Image (cartoon, rainbow, N blue to C red):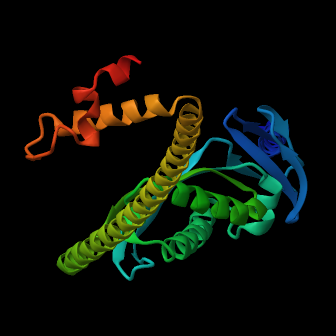
């Protein structure tokens, strides 16, 4: 092979080497940053064939897709001093590659996992350390998870990471602690039931006392109103009697005698009276009635 042919192939190899070092591809699921001597030059978000300065600039590719991080099972002491083993599952993505490159060292999946392990682990431990086991196993669980998500999102915002979701996959008691925890929970529930019953009895007594007080007041008011009405009736009756006596005293005597007859006749009381008695004057002298 002649020197010209060798030179041609060497030049062709050099051109191909330069082109290979100058061109790179960014797929639709990726984003890239271009560094020159370790300093950031540009960010590439659009997919396609891209160009860089060979041997001077280097490219770091990051995922755009949502990625997963599983925190290893962690033993946590809750607010009621019960220990549980918690597994968490985090979904995240890199939404700011520049901030991610500056904040996470090394700026790769390993460095991300290390930072998330520290941040998620400490947040879960701090939040769950203030709640009780029965709260974690009740409808309050969603509120607790919302608090954990909010705090982790705030902590990772400065890392160029966006937390999509964070969940507690499993919560269980360590095997060696289960009997003691179950006994303690049973005692707590019994105490809670007794307290509820005591509160119920107190409330019932309060309701009964209030009802009895209201009953006494109503009866007193009803008795007062009855006395008033009775007094008004008696006053009207006395006025009517007085008016009748003034007009016809003989008729009034007849009316009162009829009332007396009605009370005596048919009663079990035996009275021996003379027919000349004033009480029976209307029997012995009926002409007085017709007069």
Number of disc labels: 0
Q: Nearer the viewer, residue 26 or 123?
A: 123
Where does residue 182 sit, x and y in percent of width and height?
21, 73
Residue placed at 37% from the left, 70% from the top? 202
Foreground of the two, 74 or 8: 74
Query: How far from the left and from the top, in percent, is residue 85?
Result: 35, 70
Give percent across and percent down for residue 73: 38, 68
From what the image shows, is residue 50 above or below residue 220?
Answer: above
Vertical relation: 157 (above or below) 259: below
Q: Is residue 82 left or right of residue 220?
A: left
> Viewer-proximal residue, 149 or 238?
238
Residue 86 seen in render: no
* Above or below for 207 versus 13: below
The picture places residue 218, in percent across and down from the top left corner, at 48, 53
Residue at the spot 15% in from the left edge and 45% down from the top edge: 273
Please give left or right for residue 84 compared with residue 149 in the image.
left
> Dividing the image into 4 quarters, which one contains the C terminus?
top left
Q: Residue at x 78, y 38 (%)?
A: 9
Q: Nearer the viewer, residue 246 or 192?
A: 246
């Amino acid at each position: 092979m002649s020197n010209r042919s060798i030179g041609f192939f060497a030049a062709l190899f050099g051109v191909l080497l330069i082109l290979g070092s100058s061109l790179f591809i960014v797929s639709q699921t990726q984003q890239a940053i271009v560094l020159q001597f370790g300093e950031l030059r540009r960010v590439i978000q659009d997919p396609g064939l891209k160009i860089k300065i060979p041997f001077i600039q280097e490219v770091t590719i990051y995922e755009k897709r949502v990625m997963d991080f599983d925190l290893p099972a962690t033993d946590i002491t809750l607010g009621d001093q019960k220990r549980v083993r918690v597994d968490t599952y985090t979904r995240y993505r890199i939404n700011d590659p520049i901030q991610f490159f500056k904040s996470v060292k090394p700026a790769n999946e390993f460095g991300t996992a290390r930072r998330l392990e520290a941040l998620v682990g400490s947040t879960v431990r701090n939040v769950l350390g203030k709640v009780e086991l029965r709260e974690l196993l009740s409808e309050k669980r969603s509120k607790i998870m919302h608090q954990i998500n909010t705090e982790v999102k705030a902590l990772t915002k400065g890392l160029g990471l966006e937390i999509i979701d964070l969940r507690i996959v499993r919560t269980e008691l360590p095997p060696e602690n289960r009997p003691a925890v179950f006994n303690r929970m049973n005692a707590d529930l019994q105490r809670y039931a007794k307290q509820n019953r005591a509160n119920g009895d107190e409330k019932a007594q309060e309701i009964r006392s209030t009802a009895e007080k209201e009953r006494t007041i109503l009866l007193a008011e009803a008795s007062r109103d009855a006395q008033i009405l009775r007094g008004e009736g008696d006053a009207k009756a006395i006025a009517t009697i007085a008016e009748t006596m003034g007009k016809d005293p003989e008729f009034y005597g007849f009316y009162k005698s009829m009332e007396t007859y009605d009370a005596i006749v048919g009663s079990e009381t035996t009275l021996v009276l003379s027919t000349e008695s004033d009480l029976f004057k209307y029997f012995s002298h009926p002409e007085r009635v017709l007069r």
